[in-house]
Image (cartoon, rainbow, N blue to C red):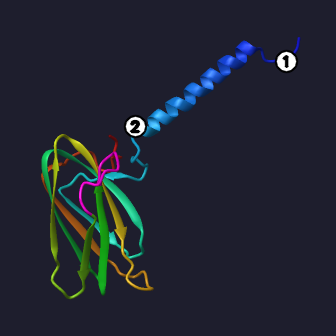
Amino acid sequence: MKNTLSIEKLAIFLVLAIMVIVSGEAAAQKTPNVRDDTLLITSRVFTTEIKGDESERVFAFWADKGEVVLKIKTTAKNANAGAYLNFYDKNDEDLTDLILTQGVAGMPTETITQKIRFDRKTLVYLQIKEISYGSSANYRGTLQIAFGGSFIEGKAKNQRAID
């Protein structure tokens, strides 16, 4: 008995391999922005530390039909602190212009108000890119975002963002 593959077995193998590849691509296209490290914001007040090292992080939150009102402020711990904020949807469409938020130690904290309208329930991604001012990555501070309006709160903490 020879150990050869028949044409029928080879054809079945190829069909199965193609099905596995196509189903994997379809699953990847369904949720292009979901990453293992994307945590869901579940509270109306979100606070995170800024290190000033040009790092990037992505978070997500749910918004219902209507308008979400964001109140954004950055407080510097020493010198200045800042970040760029980008809000986008599951199709990578920007929902706002790029937002620059900065704080200067010893100065009053500026609050930026941003409104985003939604026609339906939407998963919103928030990309935070920290700013390094100069040669030292020691521009620490705190970024705080207060969510109002149609922001949806109360899902389980540390839940991954899944659309």
Callout 2, which amino acid?
Lys
Q: Quadrant of residue 129?
A: bottom left
Q: Quadrant of residue 49?
A: bottom left
Which region is colored magenta?
Answer: 88-97
Task: Examine the rendered structure and indicate whether residue 130 appears above or below residue 91.
Answer: below
Q: Is residue 93 part of the magenta span, yes or no?
A: yes
- Residue 116 in the image, given as x and y percentages of width and height: 17, 54
Kindly state the secondary structure of the residue where label 2 is placed. Answer: helix
Callout 1, which amino acid?
Asn
In the image, taking residue 64 as reference, residue 10 lies left or right, namely right
In the image, taking residue 70 as reference, residue 81 lies left or right, namely right
Name which residue lies at 67% across and 21% down.
13
Q: Nearer the viewer, residue 90 or 58?
A: 90
Quadrant housing the N terminus: top right
Q: Which residue is mark 2?
A: 30
* Distance CA(mark 1)–CA(mark 2): 41 Å
Q: Which residue is mark 1?
A: 3
Looking at this rendering, what residue extends furthest in the right direction? 1
| Magenta-colored segment: predominant secondary structure | loop
Residue 13 image label: none
Q: Assess disc 2: are there few (<14), some (14-19) or many (≥20) residues with their C-alpha within 10 Å of its C-alpha.
A: few
Q: Assess disc 1: are there few (<14), some (14-19) or many (≥20) residues with their C-alpha within 10 Å of its C-alpha.
A: few
- Residue 16 in the image, given as x and y percentages of width and height: 61, 22
